[in-house]
Amino acid sequence: MSTFNWIIQLVYVAAASCFVLGLHLMNTPATARRGNQLSTGGMVAAIAATLAIIIHAGTISATGWIVMLAGGLLGGGAGLYAARTVQMTAMPQLVSIFNAVGGGAAALVAIHDYINLAGRAAGPAESITITTLLDVLIGAVTFSGSIIAAGKLQGLISAAPVTFPGSRVINMAAAAIAAAASVYLIVTPSVPMLLVVIAAALVFGVTMVLPIGGADMPVVISLLNAFTGTAVAMAGFVIGNWALIIAGALVGASGGILTKLMADAMNRSLGNIMIGGFGTGDGGAAAALGPGGDVRSIAADDAAIQLAYAQKVIIVPGYGLAAAQAQHAVAELAGVLEERGIEVSYAIHPVAGRMPGHMNVLLAEANVPYPLLKEMDEINPEFPRADVALVIGANDVTNPAARRAGTAISGMPILDVDHAKSIIVIKRSMASGYAGIDNELYVNPKTSMFFGDAKTALTELTAAVKTLVA
Ligand code: TAP
């Protein structure tokens, strides 16, 4: 191996190490930013090494350079702009678009490689064909599935499960055609058959995601993210770039683990989610009914008295806090309570909100100190000692119905909010959350409902607390 190749391989080792270490640092919020920076550094090094290989080989034409640089600048610029301007609540669809381009790019690498090889007299070797095929199959499924997922989340396609007569049959037929065409392709290499594989995989991706309900999308996006990583790893095998193999494998493995964690935290099996027909977002038919029993409604002044004279308050944030962008308002209220000597902490449910770590990211934005954020297992034993549990835009993750069999959320671990001495719930109405079921917490005699938009309600509450004598 030449000195140049040695240096390139060393840079790839360093880049891969940065990815692994970066991922490790993302384990805790305190080091996550550094982890992100380290991974970015690794990616810059990998791109620089790849460019060095291209320059060293000297085979690329002037037009090739223009196309490559224009693509890099256009893609990089669009990615940077999207990442910097995206609203936190729109993050899942952005990730979905990134999955689509990642999967699509990986598939294109394999398609290019295959067509090049097929053009040669010897034809492709079997081992290359298998990785190429897997790359094309997974990449194409990820591409079309992720486009549909992003469209659903952005409201361009119905967020509800979309089914039509024969949709399942089309889905299964697409899978069967893709599998049969792949086998045929291994035995008899042919470009037209590759096009059949691509078309079938694209149709499969669309018909796989369409029947899934809008609010199940975060789990599906995580799964598609794992697919993207796998497709990229396959692309690494196809072009013999092991930095790509490692990066793809890391994304594939972490996406797979995240998918499992999310499904477990919702007490749903992945198969159940993929079958679809569940979770069509907030509100819905059951929304207006409200749980049976009396609901006690209070105003800001009453809620302020309960909070101001408490010793321990646990804040329970949920999707509504994110929707109202009330993170700064809640941090301000917590600050005012702490100034009065009240112990304040935040109870973080693993699937509160609409994406993994949603509440952590949101509260970090408002500079809430990390040690105040308590995971479910840590905070649940503390609820009986809390004078007030202040639930802000959280619904399903607090619903005691999860402890009983026969409900949409049965078995889902919840925050034991009902064990607190008193409960204040801030939300706009009696509407249900993601699972579309009534919340028994709202008719608990210890619960007071403070109806309103989270941001407005918290601002009123803070002002009211400030007027009370310490
Ligand atoms: P949800 O159960 O979805 O409830 C959110 C509540 O916020 C709604 O009931 C809504 O009631 C209220 N809300 C909406 N906008 C509001 C606003 N501007 N001001 C005040 N309240 C507002 O939320 P959750 O408790 O966080 O649970 C998350 C759900 O999403 C779980 O069922 C979970 O399984 C599911 N899920 C989560 C993830 C991840 S990874 N986090 C992924 C997939 C699914 P009103 O309309 O009455 O205001």
Image (spheres, rainbow, N blue to C red):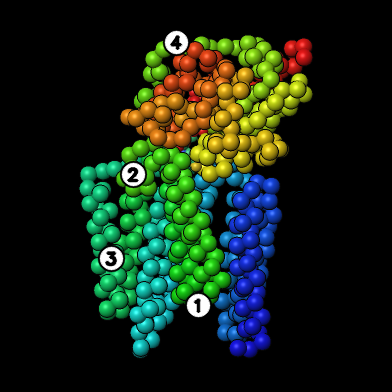
Q: Which dot, 2 or 1, sits closer to the camera?
A: 2
- Quadrant of residue 53 in the image? bottom right
Q: Is residue 242 left or right of residue 214?
A: right
Give the crowd class for mark 2: few <14, some 14-19, many >=20 residues within 10 Å.
few
Q: Residue at x 43, y 44 (%)?
A: 263
- Which circle's residue, 2 or 1, is located before the other in the chain? 1
- Which circle's residue, 1 or 3, is located before the other in the chain? 3
Q: Are marks 3 and 2 in contact (CB under 8 Å)?
A: no
Spatial CA distance of label 3 from label 2 is 23 Å
Q: Residue at x 77, y 14 (%)?
A: 470
For disc 3, the marked residue is 179
Residue 52, percent from left and from top: 64, 78
For disc 2, the marked residue is 272
Image quarter (top left, top right, bottom left or bottom right) of the N terminus: bottom right
For disc 4, the marked residue is 294
Residue 145, percent from left and from top: 40, 53
Give the crowd class for mark 3: few <14, some 14-19, many >=20 residues within 10 Å.
some
Spatial CA distance of label 2 from label 4 is 35 Å
Q: Is residue 268 left or right of residue 84?
A: left
- Which circle's residue, 2 or 4, is located before the other in the chain? 2
For disc 1, the marked residue is 240
Q: Residue at x 51, y 64 (%)?
A: 248
Q: Which dot, 4 or 1, sits closer to the camera?
A: 4
Spatial CA distance of label 1 from label 3 is 25 Å
Q: Are marks 4 and 1 in contact (CB under 8 Å)?
A: no
Q: Amino acid at mark 1?
A: Gly
**In this view of the protein, can residue 324 be seen by the observer?**
no
Using the image, determine if residue 420 lies above or below residue 469: below
User: Judging from the image, what secondary structure is the residue with disc 4 in?
Assistant: loop
Q: Residue at x 40, y 35 (%)?
A: 411
Spatial CA distance of label 4 from label 3 is 57 Å
